[in-house]
Image (cartoon, rainbow, N blue to C red):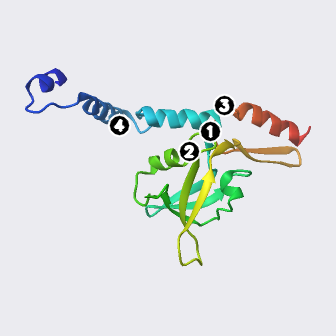
Amino acid sequence: VYQHIRNNYVDDVPLEHLVEEAVIATLRELDPHSSYLNREQMAALNTRISGEFAGVGIQYVIHRDTVVVRGTIANSPAERARICVNDRIISIDSKPIIGIPTDSIPTLLRGTPNTKVDIGVVRRGDSKPLTITLKRDYIESSAISASARFGDIGYIAASAVSKPLAAEFYAAYKSLGD
């Protein structure tokens, strides 16, 4: 089919996009757990799994096409700049982000350590948007979000799967004691 399109279609068509869409459609038909990741998505997944990346340390959700801050990572540029819970991010480096694909946001926030990024923020109670300049830094993210002991039962919560998970889990286990 692709050879026929290449040889006989009225216009020149780049086949890479057609092949990618065909793979996505094929995998969608298999089961709900099979999916295709393009080069950028795979790089982002590998970054998450490694547990190490450079960014600003903002945890967010998308609510009605708007990025809403849910928290900041401890000792991150966002925490140091006092980004607040419920701040609404409206631009990154002067580019409006309302309505952009959600998988583009981490790419815009992450980058090379010590590079600057301007974040446009609307904060409750402020009449004008704020522009906050952050310097990207390595973000220490822990896969273990909580650990506690209740009598003879230990509780360890893992919030992510990453390469450091086993070591972090073991450290949390040891901290609970015998």
Give the SS element for disc 3.
loop
Q: Quadrant of residue 46?
A: top right
Alpha-carbon span between mark 1 and mark 3: 13 Å
**Which residue position is annotated with label 3?**
163
- Between marks 4 and 2, how big is the CA–CA gap? 30 Å
Residue at 31% over, 32% down: 20
Disc ID at residue 110: 2
Task: Specify which label sits upstream in the sequence, 4 or 2.
Answer: 4
Dot placed on the residue nearer the N-terminal end, 1 or 2: 1
Mark 3–mark 2 Cα distance, whole angstroms, equals 19 Å
Report the Cα–Cα distance between label 4 and label 3: 28 Å
Callout 1 crowding tier (Cα within 10 Å): few <14, some 14–19, many ≥20: many
**What residue is shown with label 4?**
28
Contact between labelled residues 2 and 4, with CB atoms less than 8 Å apart: no
Q: Is residue 50 left or right of residue 145?
A: left
Which element type, helix, strand or loop, lies under badge 4?
helix
Name of the residue lying farthest toward the right: 178
In the image, what residue occupies the spot 52% across and 47% down? 106
State the residue in front, 165 or 156. 165
Q: Report, in whole angstroms, how far the alpha carbon at label 1 lies from the one at label 2.
A: 8 Å
Mark 1 secondary-structure assignment: strand
Where does the image place residue 148, in percent across and percent down from the top left?
82, 49
Classify residue 97 as left or right of residue 143.
left
Residue on which the image places disc 1: 53
Closer mark to the observer between disc 4 and disc 2: 2
Pointer 1 with pointer 3, Cβ within 8 A: no
